[in-house]
Amino acid sequence: MSGSAGSKARVPAEGDRLRALPPVGELAARLSGVPHGAAVRAAREAVAEARERVLAGGEAGDLERAARDRLALLLEGTLRPVVNATGVIVHTNLGRAPLAEAAREAAAESASGYANLEYDVREGRRGSRQAHLEPLLTRITGAEAALAVNNCAGAVLLACAALASGREIVVSRGQLVEIGGSFRIPEVAQQSGARLVEVGTTNRTKISDYVRPLGPQTGAILRAHPSNFRTLGFVEEVAIEELCALGRERGVPVIDDVGSGVLADALPELADEPAVRRSVAAGAAVVCFSGDKLLGGPQAGLLVGAREAITACREHPLARALRIDKLSLAALAATLRLYLDPANAVKEIPVLRMLSAVDSDLLARAERMRDLLTRRGVEAEVLWAAAKVGGGALPLLDLEGPVCAVDPAPLGLDALAGRLRSHEPPVIGRAREGWMLLDPRTLDDAQADVAAGAVARVLAR
């Protein structure tokens, strides 16, 4: 009995464990090959956290590993590329639209040094950053004038503020939508200083509903495309042509928020989204749309329309607060130049290429992933499944096509998904009926190899 008791290891008291913690300088010295200041900061934070654990009755843990993990976050950053195998083309959580090669090169070139962002090199005087975009936007959309800001919500806010601040904006109840991140159209519009006047009902709004409230206090009529949902059945809405005709008759400008920015209106997959050119041709004073969704460019909010209305937006104080930066401007201009040749745009802009991908190409990529996996002992099949557009666009459209379906055994779906997220680069797939799906629509051949290789390595472990 006494021998057994004497052989038990002594548990260090709390004070002993605290005294055993290494000095910050000593721990920092172990973190070689990194800036001294960063090593000291990481060591100090690791020691402080270990102290808190000990005081709470826990163990100090591996301080050097904790400090190195902190250094990795500090020096490598948390924003990094991922492989999107979900089949969601405009994936909001994964950065929305991937840029065309020309747009990537333009942004990199602009970032590498100085640029004539707001300098007229011909005249040798100050210029406007909008001069790099307006000629492209007016040519592509047919509008008289154009302006770019930092996102579409900003574009709507600016248009409402410039045309209707202190006055009323008439809008259909069925269009008071909530967009991503819990931002709501009524709240965005009200920040402009305008008062919203709701007309019609959730499912039916007629032209007569718009006519009744129009008067001296009306600043604008707002149409907001309900991009992320659809009402079906007993529904009615007013076409943009009819709404603009009413606006002209009553002298009230129409602001049309068309959302995702459809410029490739010849693509059949985009037939149910409002085309920018149609709204411009109908006579909308300002048409607002995104740059980073179906247009396929960087984050931006675009305003095109009548010269007088766009000038009012350009001269409003909010225009400076919302202005587009030079990297986004360079990428956006390069993307818009691709639209000058519509057929080339479909080939070069990733979003459009994914939307219009043919089954034979998708099948070849799905089989490529399946074959790589089966050669490495992983059970995989080619099945058919529906990809989605994403980004709040075309919620009812299913893009049917072949996918590579992986059996997650022996890990199970959750464990496999977790380990793929920890892979470098992280691989994000989607689950269906017990399978892990790798969708070739949002992958190129190189990314497909990375995705399949990551799955094979994870399951092999």
Image (cartoon, rainbow, N blue to C red):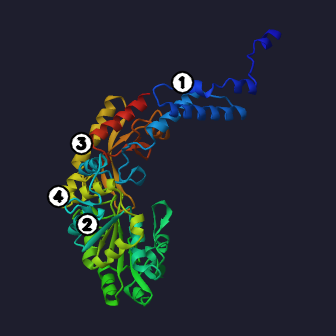
SS of the residue under disc 3 = helix
Q: On residue 134, which mark appears?
A: 2
Residue contact at pointers 4 and 2, CB within 8 angstroms = no
Q: Which residue is mark 3?
A: 364
Q: Quadrant of the C terminus?
A: top left
Toward the viewer: 311 or 79?
Answer: 311
Toward the viewer: 400 or 355?
Answer: 355
The CA span between labels 4 and 2 is 22 Å
Q: Quick check: 447 above or below 124?
A: above
Q: Residues within 10 Å of mark 4 (few under 14, many from 20)?
A: few
The CA span between labels 3 and 1 is 52 Å
Q: Position of residue 428 (x, y in %)?
A: 41, 43
Q: Which residue is mark 1?
A: 29
SS of the residue under disc 2 = helix
SS of the residue under disc 4 = helix
Q: Residues within 10 Å of mark 1 (few under 14, many from 20)?
A: some
Which of pointers 3 and 1 lies earlier in the amino acid sequence?
A: 1
Q: Which residue is mark 4?
A: 343
The CA span between labels 3 and 4 is 23 Å
Taking the view exactly as shown, the residue that stands out farthest to the top is 3
The CA span between labels 2 and 3 is 41 Å
Residue contact at pointers 3 and 4, CB within 8 angstroms = no
Mark nearest the camera among 4 and 2 is 2
Q: On residue 43, which mark appears?
A: none
Q: Quick check: 184 above or below 331?
A: below
Toward the viewer: 343 or 55?
Answer: 55
Residue contact at pointers 1 and 4, CB within 8 angstroms = no
Which of pointers 1 and 4 lies earlier in the amino acid sequence?
A: 1
Q: Position of residue 376 (x, y in %)?
A: 34, 28
